[in-house]
Image (cartoon, rainbow, N blue to C red):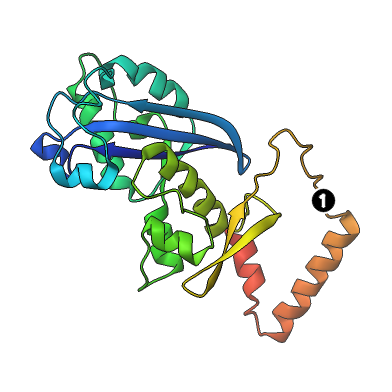
């Protein structure tokens, strides 16, 4: 399974008001492991950046003067994300900007959803933690992810942090080795030591025929004892 965690930085909040993408950052996951492959590019937006946006990400108009335009990197970008599941925090924001950039290009370009599927981790977090703060910073605190380097927003750094958050939210850890414990607002915070992506994959042990038979017999007993209300049978029927 190939997934790409994505973040963007922009000149402002609304593409409908002419705002543009100025940075794209992506990191690759294969079978829930960071591979070390990434796509990262600053972009010349051909317009000024809002002062409020500069305060968020620290990217200035002067810095972007010699950077390529979206049209210069679109092929490489789409080649990187093509066929993957894109993982984005607040996906409508980033996807809206990317689709606007694609519409501004010469040629026959489709919306981003044509090239890859999209998972919104903000929607996922709201389902898991209803009524709580679910910003990327809040999720880092909740899942003890070290975001101490995040003094300003940056697309590649935020994509790397979101990858850690996504794996924690969905039951996987980027590491089993936690060290350098620190206390932030009374909570332990751990730096992550990543597992070597070249290590041998863990062996999958499948259930034997005897195991499956015992499992089915147990479910039949539960079904009988519960007057046909065995939840596990309902779940398995949905698979």
The residue at the point 52 percent across, 57 percent down is: 145
In which quadrant will I find the N terminus? top right
Residue 177 placement: quadrant: bottom right
In which quadrant will I find the C terminus? bottom right
Side of 234 relative to 76 (left or right)? right
Residue 44 placement: quadrant: top left
- 210 or 188, which is in the foreground? 188
Say what secondary structure mark 1 lies in. Answer: loop
- 107 or 137, which is in the foreground? 137
The residue at the point 68 percent across, 36 percent down is: 197
Q: Position of residue 24 (x, y in %)?
A: 35, 32
Q: Which residue is mark 1?
A: 206
Q: Outermost residue toward the left?
A: 17
- 168 or 183, which is in the foreground? 183
The residue at the point 62 percent across, 74 percent down is: 231
> In this orientation, does residue 82 appear?
no
Side of 221 relative to 144 (left or right)? right
Residue 98 placement: quadrant: top left
Q: Position of residue 113 (x, y in %)?
A: 35, 35
């Amino acid at each position: 399974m190939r997934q790409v965690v994505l973040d963007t930085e922009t000149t402002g909040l609304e593409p409908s008001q002419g705002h543009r993408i100025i940075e794209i950052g992506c990191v690759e996951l294969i079978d829930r492991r960071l591979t070390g492959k990434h796509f990262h590019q600053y972009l010349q937006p051909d317009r000024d950046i809002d002062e409020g946006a500069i305060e968020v990400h620290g990217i200035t108009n002067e810095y972007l003067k010699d950077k390529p335009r979206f049209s210069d990197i679109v092929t490489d970008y789409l080649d990187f994300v093509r066929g993957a599941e894109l993982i984005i925090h607040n996906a409508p924001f980033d996807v809206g900007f990317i689709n606007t950039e694609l519409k501004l290009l010469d040629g026959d370009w489709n919306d981003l959803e044509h090239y890859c599927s999209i998972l919104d981790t903000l929607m996922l977090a709201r389902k898991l933690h209803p009524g709580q703060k679910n910003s990327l910073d809040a999720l880092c605190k909740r899942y003890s992810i070290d975001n101490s380097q995040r003094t300003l927003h940056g697309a590649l750094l935020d994509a790397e942090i979101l990858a850690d958050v996504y794996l924690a939210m969905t039951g996987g850890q980027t590491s089993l080795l936690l060290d350098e414990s620190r206390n932030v607002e009374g909570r332990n915070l751990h730096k992550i030591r990543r597992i070597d992506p070249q290590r041998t994959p863990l062996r999958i042990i499948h259930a034997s025929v005897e195991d499956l038979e015992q499992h089915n017999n147990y479910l039949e007993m539960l079904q009988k004892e519960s007057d046909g209300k065995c939840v596990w049978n309902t779940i398995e029927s949905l698979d």
